[in-house]
């Protein structure tokens, strides 16, 4: 085994763990939106998202479907894109905190300003950046376990 093969295999394994973490987070988030109205349509009303009765199940289905696809490594680059959009919308719902109280109350200080925004959006920003990494670096097709790792020999 060459050093290039070893590095490629290590990189694929590490990206695989990131994919699993992102996938499980989105599957759970999507399921919670379906199972609990206060996290689905009712929360979307509070956040000011248009057509909440339609958007909540749509976002939930997107998170679950794309999360499962990421989990099994199916078109990871393409699947990460709708999840990035999902996170950009989630971040946008927290922007009002910069100038005043947001639509969702924050229990702990600070309750307004940049620190409040950064605190409220921390998971959303992390998930967006993780999806960006997957979209940028994931192989376009996940090799099966029986396939050999790519070599540097051309």
Image (cartoon, grey):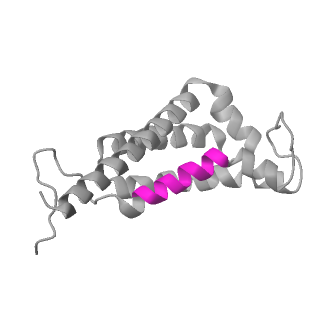
Q: Residue at x 83, y 46 (%)?
A: 102
Q: Position of residue 60 (x, y in %)?
A: 52, 38
Q: Can see residue 48?
A: no
Tell me what residue is drawn at x 21 percent, y 64 percent: 4
* Quarter location, residue 152: bottom left
Point out residue 95 in the picture as x, y percentages from the top left corner: 76, 55
Q: Which residues are magenta?
A: 122-134
> Furthest-bottom residue in view?
154
Q: Does 69 sit above or below residue 76?
A: above
Please state which of residues 38 and 139 is positioned toward the viewer in this rendering: 139
Tell me, yes or no, whether the highlighted magenta stretch contains residue 4.
Answer: no
Q: Residue at x 14, y 65 (%)?
A: 151
Residue 67 appears at what percent x and percent y? 42, 41
Location of the C terminus by quadrant is bottom left
Q: Considering only vertical position in the picture, is 40 above or below 128? A: above
Left or right: residue 104 versus residue 4 is right
Residue 121 x %, y %: 69, 48
Q: Mark yes or no: residue 78 visible.
A: yes
The tally of labels here is 0
Horizontally, is 69 left or right of 29 in the view? left
Residues 57 and 7: in front is 7
Closer to the camera, 36 or 75? 75
Question: In terms of image quadrants, where is residue 85?
Answer: bottom right
Q: Quadrant of the N terminus?
A: bottom left
């Amino acid at each position: 085994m060459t050093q290039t093969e070893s590095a490629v295999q290590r990189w694929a394994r590490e990206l695989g763990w990131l994919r699993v973490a992102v996938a499980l987070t989105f599957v759970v988030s999507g399921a919670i939106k379906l199972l609990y109205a206060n996290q689905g349509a009712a929360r979307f009303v509070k956040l000011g998202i248009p057509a909440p009765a339609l958007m909540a199940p749509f976002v939930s289905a997107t998170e679950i479907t794309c999360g499962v696809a990421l989990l099994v490594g199916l078109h990871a680059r393409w699947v990460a894109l709708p999840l990035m959009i999902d996170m950009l919308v989630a971040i946008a719902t927290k922007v009002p905190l910069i100038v005043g109280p947001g639509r969702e109350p924050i229990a702990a200080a600070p309750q307004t300003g940049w620190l409040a925004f950064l605190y409220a959006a921390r998971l959303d920003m992390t998930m967006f950046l993780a999806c960006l990494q997957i979209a940028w670096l994931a192989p376009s097709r996940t090799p099966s376990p029986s396939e050999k790792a790519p070599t540097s020999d051309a």
